[in-house]
Amino acid sequence: MTRRLLGALLRLAPRGFREGPGADLLQVHDARAAELTGRDRRFIRLRRLDFGIREAWGLGVLVAGLWIDVWNQRERRGGVMFETLWQDARFAARSLRRNPGFAWTAIAVIAIGIGANAAIFTAANAFFFRPLPFDEPGELVVLYETNPEFGWDDATAAPANMFDWREQVGAFADVSAYSEFTSQLTTFREGEPVLVGGTSVVGNFFTTLGVAPQLGRTFRLEETWEGSDNVVVLSHRLWQEYFGGDPDVVGKTIQMNDASPEIVGVMPAGFHFPSAQTDLWYPRGWAVGAREEVWFRRAHMVRAFARLAPGVDMDEADAQLQVVVRRLQVEYPETNAVMGAGIAPMHDFLVKGVRTQLLVLLGAVGLLLLLACTNVANLMLVRANDRTREVALRRALGAARERVARQMLGESVLIAGIGAAIGLALGWVGLQAIATSEDLGIDGATSLALDHRVVLFTAAVAIASGLLFGAGPVFRTMAGDAESALRDGGRSSTGGRRGLRTVSALVTVEVALALMLVLGAGLMVRTFATLRSVDPGFEPAGLMAVQFGIPPSRYQTRDEVLDFYDRFIASMEARPGIRKVGTVQQLPLSGTSWSSSAKGETWGPDRVAFEVIHRRADADYFETVGTPLIRGRLFETTDGPDDPLVVVINETFAREHFGPDEDPIGERIAYDREPTEESNWYEIVGIVADQHQQTPRHAPRAEVFENRDQDWGRSSWVVIRADGGTDQIMPSVRAVLAEMDPLIPIARTESMTQVWRRSMAREAFLLKLLSVFGAVALLLATVGVYGVTAQAARRRTQEIGIRMALGARGLDVLRLMLRHGLVVIGLGLFFGVMGASLGARALQSLLFGVEATDPATLVAVAGLLGFVAVVACYVPARRATRLDPVSSLRSE
Amino acid sequence: MAGMTPLTYEILLALADESRHGYGIIKEIEERSGAGAAPSTGALYLALQRMQTDALIEETAAGPGADARRKYYRLTLKGRDHAEAESVRLAELVVAARRKNLLAGGAS
């Protein structure tokens, strides 16, 4: 980490140094770091941290020093500018040290603002700016399929179509594909079965991406097909962990499920595309004749991508692609009649899911920084007012106007600089905290890093904010004419009418900005609450799901596998505390596995149910997870493999595809748009309540449950409900497994509460961040309102004294004082609402069950902010009423 | 040259007998003054850079048996003069300190 930070810092050094002694410096650093590890290993982390901090600091000093030297040299030629700059900086530092309360408050506020920006920008950087780790990533495009009937707009492609694009579109230098699904493969490590994540790919996957292996070679196109597919490429991580970095690993074999493919290559460290879990890549292994078969054009199962031929742009490639798409529509009407395809830059495609979220967060931290700047500007103004006389005096004594201005600006820049350094550290720490709970970065391709972009961004933000909050006070001080300031005994220096007006305007802005930020948090609270109140269709508490890696070598037939599950379920249910156990192919709130069209036997020619989801389950699944049967029956023992096929559908299917007077039960359906002789017919025997398949945000979709005993498949989740929480479940699972077959690994375990929470993780994440921003905004605005009221009170001390001497009561004074604060707050709220209604649209797509302009939330937020602000304004106002008239008259 | 920094003096001292690269200078300082006394790598290179500008030291070709990828530094004549002058100044200070009984073995 330190090393990367040092590298980033070094990039800020003058070029002559960077390209010359810079490399030498890093070598020396490396040697010292290595030596540190080599010696005595006590307190090694602490010592490493200490060393890292000192090295980073030293490098910071070096970079600053080198630039000062560069400046100095220029100055020697050009004049004395640098000399004075240096004096200014020292002057600024001295004057800040004289007033540490002010300095640290300002630095803290700016550090929070810049820290939030640095953190969010680092995340945005990982997604938007860090290049994909491929050769010429700009030439890579994703090819997706579209289908208006199914509502697809960026679907995975059918392999047959992918190969046709590859051969028929001249604009593509090459086309390849990978599976978006990471499979869990059983391998053995020291005799113990373990699972590693594998991605299946088309043979030219690596060559199309343009990534080279560290060892050996990558796949060849012909290795895509069955027969030549007994090869595998390892990730650097797997190579290190399982083979101890053995340099002769290429040519050896690795146990993978029940095969032992040959290792042909090892990828460089950090390469895990397309998933952070990917640790080995294996060819898809399709049967050689598959290209002639219908399923190859029907099963949309690979994510296709292409490299554009040299000199070809996206539009041209798209035009050529569309020609081929239309040709395929005509040639294969059965599968491709309405199948379209589209093209998108790979980077854009990969970050699509997070774009809005990150932009909203960037917007939020931008507002926060603006708020922080306004706050500091306010502090500076108050200070500038106090210094009017000092400045006037210096100017009267002959100081140049620009010089005085520069000295004042120097303070701002110094505050911003220190604030930025602290903010950068704060942001990095905060981001690490976030990153432990969230995957940040493009899966398997880029990651969070404190690189030179982040450092430059932070520096730019710091300078901009320093100028932003520093300029106002400078203008104010400079504008006043020296003579009157001196003459008037500094009375106006506690804040002339104009000064108060400026401060009030700034506080109005603060209240407005705070309203927008708190409103964002409020809307996320509403969204999250609504999501939590959505019934997911099952009862998560006390429910656990487990998946096993059942080796096909020892459990070959369907009976053997089903028997394994049956015995497992029986043993589990016999254990104390376990209430019910069932199996299902895919858990709810975890996406969908496959979908098809469906057609009822009695339906007319134009009636088709598009995009019906399929899941395989046993009858006990529904009771175990707590999804009630609405009508009809579930699967029974009489629904054996040789009996007529039966299915259960969900309520949405019944509602969407059957009329109110029709009874779905008894209807037979086939999974084809136009059933043929070969179609299988399934009789609907029951209707169960809906489960949300994707997230609580996505409405349940029409779904068919196949019977586990009839529609067999190897992979299943076992769901287990216990009476008293999930703690006792896993020990039972392990005990039962140890008895039955200790060589079977547990592939994955999930508590269903976790699954449920994860389905709302994005909203929870946004809620957390926006709440923090909102709270900080509230605090800053409160401080601002307090400050302006207190200042107004101070300015009017004499007036109040006179009024009270003339018989005004405390209440009158209070009213007088409050009036000013209330106007400021009211205006702020008004502008805030205006701003919020402009910005609301950006947030809308992240919300659920609440409009971005929701009046109730708006009123609640404005009420909260208004209340807090009025309290902040009441306290100093109240104090003013307690003044003793005599002493306040003397207050000069 | 008024007010030579302690680090500058340490570097001049390290280079007085032979030319060294950055890591060698650090090792030499650590040996003489303890591991805690070594500057950060950044501070060392800033000093080296500035001393080159002031012509106190210069880069030199790596000697026989040395690592050719590294940059080696040696004293210039001016550097040697300054090192001597500073040593004399320090020695005079030590004598003065001894005279005032700040150092064991002082004039009593």
Image: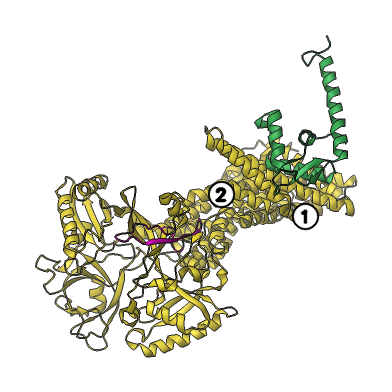
Chain colours: A yellow, B green
The segment highlighted magenta reads A251-277
Of helix, strand and loop, which one carries label 1?
Answer: helix
Q: Residue A518 placed where, x, y %? A: 51, 56
Task: Work out whether residue A785 can be spotted.
Answer: no
Residue A304 within the segment the image draws in magenta = no
Instruction: Decide if residue A405 is on the left or right side of residue A134.
Output: right
Name the foreground residue: A52 vs A772. A52
Q: Residue A80 placed where, x, y %? A: 88, 50
Q: Which mark is residue A475?
A: 1
Neighbours of disc 2 within 10 Å: few (<14), some (14-19), many (20+): many
Separation (CA) of disc 2 from disc 1:
35 Å
Chain letter behind tag 2:
A
Q: Which mark is residue A428?
A: 2
Depth check, mark 2 against mark 1: the one in front is 2
Q: What's the residue at 31%, 61% (across, down)?
A: A259
Of helix, strand and loop, which one carries label 2?
Answer: helix
Same subunit, labels 2 and 1: the answer reads: yes
Q: Is residue A331 above or below residue A512?
A: below
Query: What secondary structure prevails in the magenta region?
Result: loop
Quarter of the figure with residue A509: bottom right
